[in-house]
Image (spheres, rainbow, N blue to C red):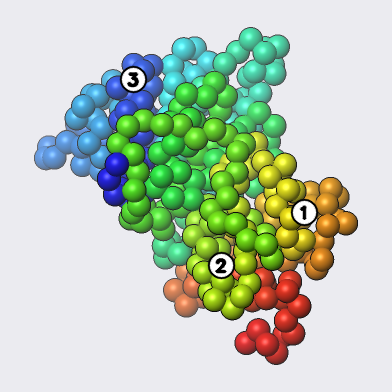
Amino acid sequence: MSKKSYRTAINEALRQEMRRDPTVILMGEDIAGGAGAPGEQDAWGGVLGVTKGLVGEFGRERVLDTPLSESAYIGAAAGAAATGLRPVAELMFVDFVGVCFDQIFNQAAKFRYMFGGNARTPLVIRAMYGAGFRAASQHSQCLYPLFTHIPGLKVVLPSSAYEAKGLLIQSIRDDDPVIFLENKVQYDEEEEVPDEAYTIPFGEANLTREGGDVTIVAFGRMVKIANEAADRLEKQGISCTVLDPRTVSPLDTATILECVRETGRLVIVDEASPRCNMATDVSALVAQEAFGALKAPIRMVCPPHVPVPFAPNLEDLYVPNADRVEAAVRATMGFKARELA
């Protein structure tokens, strides 16, 4: 085991699965780069270099640079998955889903059901999401609630390098379409990651810490922020459970409810826009199934319902941070507003 970045862990998962299974192919814009042009081959590896080096080992028949047409190559990937291959298609920024959504939610997500359970669609769509990269509102949204709404899709939000490798390998081996979302702010974050291949099952949440006072449910990058807040709160005598669902479809509702029943308090941290996001979904779940266990109102820590700002100072205010999570937890514990400053 060695320290690897989030970026390296994803690259390693792709490399190991391509070595293991010759039906795994990659598709996307500039995921290899340099085709038909003088100079360096393998020039890009995607816009942030995640797939760099793979074309050198596997060649351009398995690492396919595509035209700048998301509708074309996502549709082609869905067809390839239905006819025997295991494509991993990179949708550069998740914001670009607007031009290929039909291919995902009306086609790939429904193949198994349209053909009476006889069709497999082992398709993975990788995409970057999230604010904090100074990439403006057309390249910074958290759109995982859109995919979660669609039956037939599995939706994965890895929170760290270790989680990213295990969940991506699981995604590639799965026989249903998987939306695998990577927070671009995390690509350079490092932690210990096994060198060998391993899988993390879908629908099994990860307790990153256990405490008796408050349950914090956080998604993707927000898991790290929730743990930062929990470290501070521990010094104040407030003990938190931090729960990383890992996947939002399927969602580990049993573990969420179990934790809330143990602590009696719930704070949800979600970087997606606050209307109809995962925070509201989990809030509804707990209100319906565990209302009697609650000792305080549920608190949601989300961005405002506005486009992601481009101005750095406004973008920093937009993204949920440890200060806001800490304040929400203290509020559930009964601290008055004046004590939260």
Rendered location of residue 166, percent (x, y): 44, 36
Examine the rendering and report whether any part of residue 4 can be seen.
yes
Secondary structure found at label 1: helix
> The N terminus appears in which quarter of the rendering?
top left
> The C terminus appears in which quarter of the rendering?
bottom right
The image shows residue 118, relative to residue 170, as above or below, that is above
Please state which amino acid type lies under the numbered disc 2.
Ala
The image shows residue 38, relative to residue 161, as above or below, that is above
Q: Which of the marked residues, 2 or 1, is nearer the chain's N terminus?
A: 2
Of circles 2 and 3, the one toward us is: 2
Mark 2 Cα-neighbour bin, 10 Å: few <14, some 14–19, many ≥20: many
Please state which amino acid type lies under the numbered disc 3.
Arg
Q: Pick whichever, 341 or 71, lies toward us.
A: 341
The image shows residue 44, relative to residue 221, as above or below, that is above
Please state which amino acid type lies under the numbered disc 1.
Arg
Secondary structure found at label 2: helix
**Residue denoted by label 1:** 261
Question: Which label is found at residue 184?
Answer: none
Cα–Cα span, label 2 and label 1? 19 Å
**Residue denoted by label 3:** 20
**Residue denoted by label 2:** 230
